[in-house]
Image (cartoon, rainbow, N blue to C red):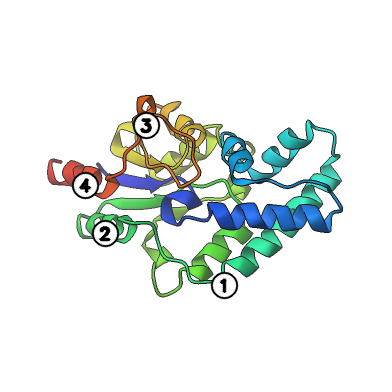
């Protein structure tokens, strides 16, 4: 293994409930009689991308200006909520430390907005040093967000790596498919609201798995 990619915000920090609450406040401010309870939001997480979830839920009735407005308001609320105490997910700092000591490159390969990335950086200040990542991507780097595999192709190209040099951690089946489509080995480490079954082969001891790979390389 020459590199390990964390594939989304959810692989680093659990924010699903904050995201859900932020969407609901944005809907209210937009005058929509919408409310995403936990069950609804879990189902919507099958498709990555906040704007895509808004479109899907509205059955494409809302025009793009309204979708953009709602999503912008949601990000504002999300940033406010992130001022609360947050910590990296279990095993994240251990994995990063091990990779750094083993001279394995690290990537944060997401297609979220730069604003969200910067908000996460601020929220985890003093708990996670994002300078450890050799590459951090955003929606600005690609035309097509996940589950399209474009961002992974971009990351491999930028680092001069082959698909067989890299392992990926993703938090949902949809995001996992973006890596698998390119033939990259990808562990599914589900977030709290990700819908998974035993047949999806979820990995709940991700730090042990990564450690085993590094120690046997």
- Whether residues under marks 3 and 1 lie with C-beta atoms below 8 angstroms apart, the answer is no
The earlier-in-sequence mark between 3 and 2 is 2
Residue 62, which numbered label? Answer: none
Q: CA distance from mark 3 to mark 1?
A: 35 Å
Sequence-first tag of 3 and 1 = 1
Q: Circle 4: is it few (<14), some (14-19), or many (20+) Cα within 10 Å?
A: some
Query: Which residue lies under the disc numbered 4?
Result: 208
Residue occupied by mark 1: 83
> Which mark lies nearer to you, 3 or 4?
4
Sequence-wise, the earlier of marks 3 and 4 is 3
Which residue is disc 2 drawn over? 94
Which of the marked residues, 2 or 4, is nearer the chain's N terminus?
Answer: 2
Q: In what quadrant of the picture does the C terminus appear?
A: top left
The disc placed on residue 184 is 3
Q: Are marks 3 and 4 in contact (CB under 8 Å)?
A: no
Tell me residue 163's x, y (percent): 35, 33
Between residue 45 and residue 51, name the one nearer to us: 45
- Outermost residue on the left side: it is 216
| Residue 21 left/right relative to 14 | right
Q: CA distance from mark 4 to mark 1?
A: 31 Å
| Number of the front mark, 3 or 1 | 1
Q: Earlier in the sequence, mark 4 or mark 1?
A: 1
Kindly state the secondary structure of the residue where label 3 is placed.
loop
Q: Are marks 2 and 4 in contact (CB under 8 Å)?
A: no
Q: Marks 3 and 2: which is nearer the front? A: 2
For the residues labelled 3 and 2, the Cα–Cα distance comes to 22 Å
Q: Residue at x 78, y 31 (%)?
A: 59
Q: Kindly state the secondary structure of the residue where label 2 is placed.
A: helix
């Amino acid at each position: 293994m020459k590199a390990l990619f964390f594939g989304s915000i959810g692989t680093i920090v659990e924010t699903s409930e904050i995201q859900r609450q932020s969407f609901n406040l944005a809907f209210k401010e937009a005058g929509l009689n919408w409310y995403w309870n936990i069950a609804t939001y879990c189902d919507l997480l099958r498709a990555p991308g906040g704007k895509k979830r808004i479109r899907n839920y509205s059955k494409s009735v809302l025009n793009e200006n309204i979708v953009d407005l709602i999503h912008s308001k949601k990000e504002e609320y999300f940033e406010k909520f992130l001022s609360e105490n947050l910590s990296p997910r279990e095993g994240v700092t251990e994995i990063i430390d091990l990779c750094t000591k083993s001279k394995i490159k690290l990537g944060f390969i997401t297609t979220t907005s730069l604003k969200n990335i910067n908000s996460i950086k601020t929220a985890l200040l003093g708990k996670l040093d994002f300078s450890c990542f050799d590459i951090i991507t955003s929606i600005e780097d690609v035309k097509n967000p996940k589950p399209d595999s474009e961002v992974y192709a971009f990351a491999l190209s930028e680092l001069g790596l082959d698909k067989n040099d890299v392992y990926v951690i993703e938090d949902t089946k949809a995001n996992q498919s973006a890596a698998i489509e390119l033939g990259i080995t990808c562990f599914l480490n589900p977030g709290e609201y990700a819908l998974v079954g035993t047949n999806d082969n979820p990995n709940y001891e991700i730090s042990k798995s990564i450690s085993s790979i590094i120690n046997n390389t």
